[in-house]
Structures are given as structure tokens and as C-alpha cells.
Image: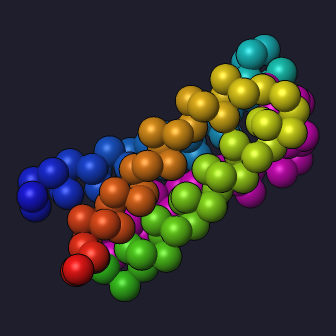
Amino acid sequence: MKIISIILILVSAALSIKHGWDGFRPPGPEQAKMMANLGITQTIMPYFSMFSIMLGLTLFFPQTFFLSNVCSAITIVLIMALSLRAGDTKTALIEIPFLALPMILIWLKYPFKF
């Protein structure tokens, strides 16, 4: 169980850091179109990128593990909501596994006892 948790933490942190790092590069045509559909401007992108990198790094600290996963889940739900508002159900559906990842990490760290 610990090995699965470690792998999922590493995957989650790597995804957060990679997406954050990619936000500092100029967007490609497809990414620019998606951001425009979601209503995300080029001005706010560095802030989202820094936030994503910060969330990826704070996963490794036990004191911030829970908060980092909750913030990641909230960010993913925000992306899903913006996608649905723009009428892009495909993007919203693609985000479901990424929403499950922080929830699974929280469950593995703090399992529910019945």
C-alpha cells in the first residue's frame, strides 16, 4: 500500500510541476484556443503556473499534504466548471481521472474507518 501511495504522490507532484512549468512557455495554438474558451488570459497564466508548482512541491511535506491535495482538487473542479460553462464537455470529462488522483491520495493517507 505504501508503494502505491509513493508512486501516486510522485505522479501527482510531477504532473503539477510539469503543468506549472509549461504555463511559463508561450502557448501553442491549441492551448491558446483552450485558454480563450475557458476565459483564462495570458496575464493570469503565470499565477496559475506558480500555484501549480507550489502545490506539486508541498505534496512532499506531511504538514501540507492534505491542504495541497484539497487545493489541487479545487483547481481541477474549477477547470471542469469553466470547461462546462464554455460548452466543452470533452475537457471536463478528461479532467475526471485527475480529480480522482488527489482524492485517492487523501484516502490512502487518511483512510475512513467504519
The location of residue 50, given as percent across then percent down, is 63, 57
Q: In this view, does 79 lie above or below 61?
A: above
Q: Specify start and end residues of the magenta stretch as a single range.
A: 34-61
Q: Which residue is drawn at 45% across and 39% down?
A: 97
Q: Quick check: 87 left or right of 64?
A: right
Q: Is residue 37 above or below residue 13?
A: above
Colour convention of the picture:
rainbow
Q: Quick check: 15 left or right of 80?
A: left
In the rendered image, residue 64 lying in the magenta stretch gets the answer no
The location of residue 96, given as percent across then percent down, is 53, 40
Out of 76 and 31, give the one closest to the viewer. Answer: 76
The location of residue 40, given as percent across then percent down, is 85, 42
Q: Quick check: 49 left or right of 85?
A: left
Q: Is residue 62 above or below residue 103?
A: below
In the rendered image, residue 39 lying in the magenta stretch gets the answer yes
Q: Can residue 105 be seen in this view?
A: yes
Considering every residue shown, the one lying at the far front of the view is 114
Out of 21 and 6, give the one closest to the viewer. Answer: 6
Q: In this view, does 39 lie above or below 73?
A: above
Q: Is residue 57 visible?
A: no
Quadrant showing the C terminus: bottom left
Q: Which residue is drawn at 57% across and 66% down?
A: 71
Q: Which residue is drawn at 52% across and 68% down?
A: 70
Q: Quick check: 91 left or right of 45?
A: left
Q: How many labels does the image show?
A: 0
The picture quadrant where one finds residue 1 is bottom left
Q: Residue at x 42, y 75 (%)?
A: 66
Considering every residue shown, the one lying at the far bottom of the view is 63
Out of 98 and 61, give the one closest to the viewer. Answer: 98
